[in-house]
Image (cartoon, helix red, strand yellow):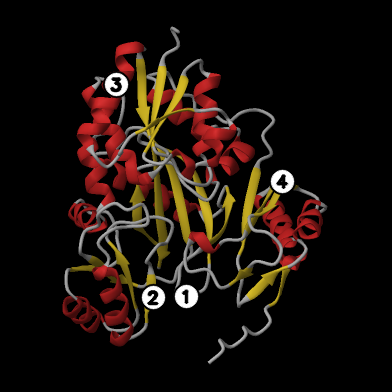
């Protein structure tokens, strides 16, 4: 077999993981998934993806597995669609002399305390922040700042552990819980530090950057505090001209300051009295199906671009003719405890709304659900396309309210446990 290999170190569990492998095959490369537990990704078996079982947290074991693969076939690239393993993939690519981002830059970026300090020193607008390694330090920082603050882990993804704390009592409780955790949801060790930061209330956006080029600005919808669950996105965002320029300038400045500038970066920002403050930079493609929205709205395939970059191929980020012009997504979340009813009917009602191109509920009828604390609490999605952002957003809101949301039924009271 002479086909070159494109190695993937683990994967994200939702969204683009499958698409990475599909794009590799379309480009004539054989995707190979390196994973401690390939069963975590159902698409791997469904798509008959070649897999290698290896402890991806063990650098020596991982390198040995890569060397065995290289002895039989040419390895053309190493990537990961999971933020947790982007630095690992970059390390492997560098050892093999293949394209990729700076692993040191990715590691620094993934530590939000290091990232914030780097951005602040480079003059990139960021919220006020303080780093705490003990509960007392977090409480003192909140007292000094005054008013509500956001407390979050210095590493994480998908709004995990991010919470608005309105007083020092809430800060103490949440910081104590975060600092007690020694591993994350992937079983990887986590730093014993938290970020205490200014609570910004302005509109939230993301800028999708590739290399040092801003591809598109996305309008983000975020659920009510104290959690900050992303509930939707609109592509493209249409802020005022001055705000649009400020968002792009802050995002690109941040990427350069962090020493990234290779492949995709997802930069999250909030407008604060006209200032585009960077909330965080993620050294990867956006989640929340944003790449799919960009593909439908602009005809730009960000997943394909990342795969091409990993293979050392030229990347074209030019808008394609025939794209819709705009696209939106809305995620279903429960506002209170509920039970899922007729999911088939809810999906059918959503798909009947003009402009809907995809609708899905993730759980089965009869499932009890509650308010979302992070991305894992999202119950389904609807994606729309239209000629303008307003048109696609209106269709998405309608399909969510009169389609997917009809699956939510009032939850009966839980039966008391027998004494």
**SS label for mark 1:** loop
Q: CA distance from mark 3 to mark 1?
A: 43 Å
Above or below: residue 6 compared with residue 136:
above
Residue hosting label 2: 164
Dot 2, crowdedness within 10 Å: few (<14), some or many (≥20)?
many
Q: Earlier in the sequence, mark 3 or mark 4?
A: 3
Q: CA distance from mark 3 to mark 4?
A: 40 Å
User: Who's the residue at 53% across and 21% down the image?
Assistant: 25
Q: Earlier in the sequence, mark 2 or mark 3?
A: 3
Above or below: residue 291 compared with residue 74:
below
Above or below: residue 296 compared with residue 355:
above
Q: Quick one: 335 or 105, which is closer to the camera?
A: 335
Total numbered labels placed on residues in the image: 4
In the rendering, at what x and y percent does residue 79 appear? 37, 31
Q: Earlier in the sequence, mark 3 or mark 1?
A: 3
- Is the Cβ of the residue at disc 1 closer than 8 Å to that at disc 2? yes
Q: CA distance from mark 2 to mark 3?
A: 42 Å
Q: Tell me the mark number nearer the camera, choosing from 3 and 1.
A: 3
Q: Earlier in the sequence, mark 4 or mark 2?
A: 2
Residue 226 in view of the camera:
yes
In the rendering, at what x and y percent does residue 388 appear? 68, 48
Q: Which mark is residue 386?
A: 4
Q: Which mark is residue 98?
A: 3
Q: Tell me the mark number nearer the camera, choosing from 2 and 3.
A: 3
Classify residue 69 as left or right of residue 303. left
Q: CA distance from mark 4 to mark 1?
A: 30 Å
Residue hosting label 1: 225
Q: Which mark is residue 23?
A: none
Q: Tell me the mark number nearer the camera, choosing from 3 and 4.
A: 3
């Amino acid at each position: 077999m002479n086909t070159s290999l494109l190695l993937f170190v683990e994967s994200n569990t939702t969204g683009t993981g499958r698409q990475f492998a599909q794009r590799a095959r379309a480009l004539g490369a054989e995707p190979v998934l390196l994973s401690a537990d390939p069963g975590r990704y159902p698409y791997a078996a469904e798509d008959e993806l070649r897999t290698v079982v290896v402890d991806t947290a063990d650098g020596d074991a991982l390198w040995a597995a890569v060397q065995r693969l290289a002895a039989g076939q040419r390895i053309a690239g190493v990537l990961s669609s999971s933020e947790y393993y982007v630095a690992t993939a970059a390390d492997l690519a560098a050892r093999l002399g293949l394209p990729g981002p700076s692993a040191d830059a990715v590691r620094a970026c993934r530590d939000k305390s290091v990232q914030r300090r780097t951005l602040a020193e480079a003059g990139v607008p960021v919220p006020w922040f303080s780093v705490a390694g003990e509960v007392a330090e977090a409480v003192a920082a909140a007292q000094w700042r005054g008013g509500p603050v956001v407390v979050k882990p210095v590493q994480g993804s998908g709004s995990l552990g991010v919470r608005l704390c309105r007083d020092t009592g809430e800060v103490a409780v949440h910081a104590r819980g975060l600092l007690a955790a020694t591993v994350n949801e992937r079983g990887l060790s986590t730093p014993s530090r938290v970020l205490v930061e200014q609570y910004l209330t302005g509109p939230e956006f993301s800028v999708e950057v590739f290399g040092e080029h801003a591809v598109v600005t996305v309008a983000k919808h975020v659920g009510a505090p104290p959690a900050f669950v992303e509930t939707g996105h609109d592509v493209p965002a249409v802020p005022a001209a001055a705000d649009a320029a400020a968002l792009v300038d802050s995002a690109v400045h941040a990427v350069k300051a962090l020493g990234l500038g290779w492949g995709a970066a997802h930069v999250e920002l909030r407008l604060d009295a006209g200032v585009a403050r960077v909330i965080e930079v993620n050294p990867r493609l956006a989640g929340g199906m944003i790449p799919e929205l960009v593909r439908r709205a602009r005809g730009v395939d960000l997943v394909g671009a990342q795969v091409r970059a990993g293979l050392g191929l030229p990347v074209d980020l030019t808008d394609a003719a025939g794209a819709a012009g705009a696209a939106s997504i809305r995620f279903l979340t429960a506002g209170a405890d509920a039970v899922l009813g007729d999911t088939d009917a809810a999906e059918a009602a959503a798909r009947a709304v003009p402009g809907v191109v995809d609708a899905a509920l993730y759980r089965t009828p009869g499932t009890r659900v509650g308010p979302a604390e992070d991305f894992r609490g999202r119950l389904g999605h609807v994606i729309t396309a239209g000629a303008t952002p307003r048109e696609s957003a209106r269709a998405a809101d309608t399909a969510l309210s009169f389609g997917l949301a009809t699956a939510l039924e009032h939850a009966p009271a839980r039966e008391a446990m027998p004494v």
